[in-house]
Image (cartoon, rainbow, N blue to C red):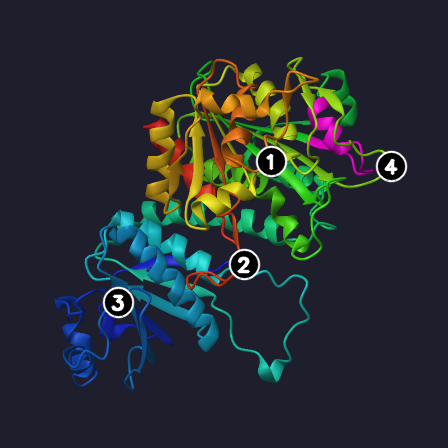
Amino acid sequence: MAVKLSVRKSDAAALDVPLLVIALAKPAELPAELRALDEHLGGTLSRTLSRRDFRGDRDETLHLSGGTKGPARLLLVGLGKTTDRPLALKRAAAIAARQAGRLGAAEIAFTAPGIDAAGVEQAAVGLLAGSWEYRELKTPVPVDERREPLRNASIVVPDEKDAREALAAGEAIGAGQALARRLAMMPGNLCTPDYLEQTAREIASRHKLGVTVFGREEMEKRKMGSFLSVAQATPQEPKLVTLEYRGGAKGDQPVVLVGKGLCFDTGGISIKPAQGMEMMKFDMCGAAGVLGAMEAIAQLAPKVNVVGIIGATTNMPSGTAIKPGDVVQAASGTFIEIINTDAEGRLVLADLLHYAKEFDPAAVIDAATLTGACVIALGNTASGVFGSDEGLVAEVLAAGKRAGEPGWQLPLWDDYKDLIKSDTGDIKNSGGRSAGSITAALFLKEFTGEYPWVHMDIAGTAYSESDLVAIPKGPTGVPVGTFVEFVRRRAG
């Protein structure tokens, strides 16, 4: 159950809550807004800060007892020496929500002296991110060992009226990220192409969006041989799902968001090593990001048209699977030589990007957990960003920065094209290990035509195999924030 968020104007000393969270930057000093609380606690805060027991370092926490009245407990959370205060507040709020869960605090108040609307929005996103858990497949903890989950969180603000709109925006983004994380965390036997279709239809029903679904038969009629070559080894019906949000004027060119939805990727005939293969349930994070973004966008209601397209299937080895050396024909007419069946995501995206032309897009952004090479290049901090239009690349990078989802541009120079030239067909689906993320993006570029296009390789950022302090290991919600920030700025 999602945490219920609110904003409130209150003196910190009068907050009768189980836990009061105080976010402070480095060097930590007692702000004027907290002097009454400090007096109420007999100088505890001022002594703590003067002794430098708490310094305000990034992610630093200190738990203090409260008084007989007012907040029962206090949690100091450090923002560090911040250059982007809203994003620092998001991280601190996420840490606070996680700590509240550990402490069994069902209700918290979050205060950051001087917080503005941007800070409220990001704090709301952080509170939702930090309190998110996937417990649907876990046996409930025995009652005598159970701690109260966080149910209510209020953000202390100087003016409630000004903060309500920001809170609503934060809730929308948080809901989109939670949806994306839930889909990603589900095992592949549950999060199937059918389930992604069902989720898309549910979003469309709640928000009155247009929805179109193609199955195997419809894709065969459209000669989507590239997508279908990946799906030919599985009995599960592949799905190409389109959601249309119409917030702009009729006839306005839409922003098109495209997501790779490999619900499980074994590698096919070019099978992956057994160790760690269970992580390949996350190979649909691009599609999850599109669905999460469409949920958030529908709630935010920006004045722009947006189309979300996902391609969902599984990549399996079987007697009907594609083989290295096979040649398939994409909907564009391009003949593709299959060098590695584990380079399947680009085969799905090839037909999706060609299909996107039908919407006469103003811009197309695709996101995919596409290459291990991108993880080698950028690690787990930044997404790889590639594009045919430098202005659009700059927009996407700026959107990612605002969302706290950093990206880094990598080249799409023609010098790399020889690596994906095919002796048998027009192009091959793998250029080998060298420049692997670049050649994958160059492959996609062949199917984009003339529209402005950006590709985001989120293989290193969509999920984490270790705890990230603000959120646990598992799905991160990337690229929901980038998509949403891009659309909001396009709406003006």
The residue wearing badge 4 is 319
Q: Are marks 2 and 4 in contact (CB under 8 Å)?
A: no
- The Cα atoms of the two marked residues, 1 and 4, are separated by 24 Å
Which residues lie in the magenta part? 225-239
Query: Of helix, strand and loop, which one carries label 4?
Result: loop
Of the 4 image quadrants, the one containing the C terminus is: top left
User: Which is nearer the N-term, disc 4 or disc 3?
Assistant: 3
Point out the frontmost of discs 4 and 3: 4
Report x, y in % for residue 469.
Answer: 42, 64
Q: Quadrant of residue 264?
A: top right
Residue 153 in view in this figure:
yes
Query: Of helix, strand and loop, which one carries label 1?
Result: strand
Report x, y in % for residue 443.
Answer: 56, 25
Answer above or below: position of 463 versus 451.
below
User: Which is nearer the N-term, disc 2 or disc 4?
Assistant: 4
The residue wearing badge 2 is 465
Per the rendering, the mark at residue 57 is: 3
Tag 3: amino acid: Asp
**Label 3 neighbour load within 10 Å: few <14, some 14-19, many 20+:** some
Tag 1: amino acid: Lys
